[in-house]
Amino acid sequence: MSELAYQIITFYEFKRLENLPELKARLKSAMDELSIKGTIIIAEEGFNSTVSGLIADIEKFIAVLEKELATQLKYKSSFHEERPFLKAKVRIKNEIVSLRQAVEIEKGIGTHAKPADWNRIISDENTIILDTRNDYEVEVGTFRGAINPKIEKFSDLPDYVRKNFNPQENRRFAMFCTGGIRCEKFAPLMKEMGFEEVYQLEGGILKYLEETPENESLWEGECFVFDDRITVDNNLMPGKTADARPLSVNPPQKKNAANPAQNETKKR
């Protein structure tokens, strides 16, 4: 088995899903059969997930996902020497990312900026660079010149923007998040608020780090991820930052180094 035997994939899509309890059961069964660990969130508005498994098993699971979700999966990928998750979960929720207000996702069409174009966009002095993530995520790392809104949860971001920016004065925004999903909701909301020129980093920080050479990167620090790695560096390898999440956020399960055999069954 290779040193980086486990593949971690992150994916989401806004699309109409039906018969959620039946879909949940089929996805959970496939995860168990292929020894896939992690969490899949499904809702009527779509799906959102980060899962991991042996490379060959992930390849098989992607085929299952594409069939069950009737899609061609767009995912971001990284690798690790051990499992970053210990359990397999499929959860039904009201939203796949919680903004707690209705948004017309279609209004975000035309706002996506590819990683290859991102440096040019955020290097423009007229661009306001907005980090849409929670405060403890931003503290670990962010893009050069980005604003930290210092929010505790994503649903606090609309109020922050309304209080601090004016569509008549602040016209050009570039926003980003870890994998892109938060911006998929927030970019169209910014358009609804009346902001004229809005960009969202397509694929998020993880896609940018995957495609951007380190010597060209405008990313500073490490990127927080919600698994046992805690953070990843510019090369998407496990970072060195300690977990600084508030107690209200469940920390990842630490593995039992003394008895690795218990790691697959120990409760998170």
Image: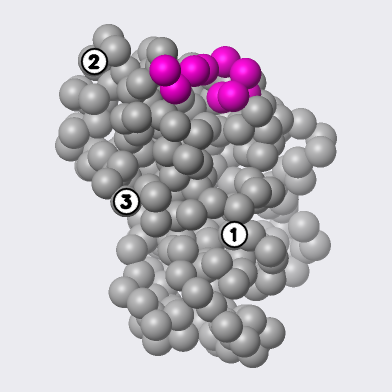
When the figure is inspected, residue 102 is found, relative to residue 191, above or below; the finding is: below
> Spatial distance from mark 3 to mark 1, Cα to Cα?
19 Å
Residue 248 location (% of width, % of height): 81, 38
Alpha-carbon neighbours of circle 2 within 10 Å: few (<14), some, or many (≥20)? few
Count of numbered badges drawn on the protein: 3
What residue lies at 41% left-to-right and 13% top-to-bottom? 169
Q: Nearer the viewer, residue 33 or 162?
A: 162
- Span of residues in magenta: 160-168
The three-letter code of the residue at mark 1 reads Ile
Which of the image's four quarters has the C terminus? bottom right
What residue lies at 74% left-to-right and 69% top-to-bottom? 265
Secondary structure under the numbered disc 2 in the rendered image: loop
Quadrant hosting residue 196: top left
Q: Which residue is mark 3?
A: 109
What residue lies at 35% left-to-right and 70% top-to-bottom? 73
Q: Which residue is mark 1?
A: 96
Q: Is residue 179 visible?
A: no
Q: Which residue is mark 2?
A: 124
The three-letter code of the residue at mark 2 reads Asp
**Residue 168 tag number:** none
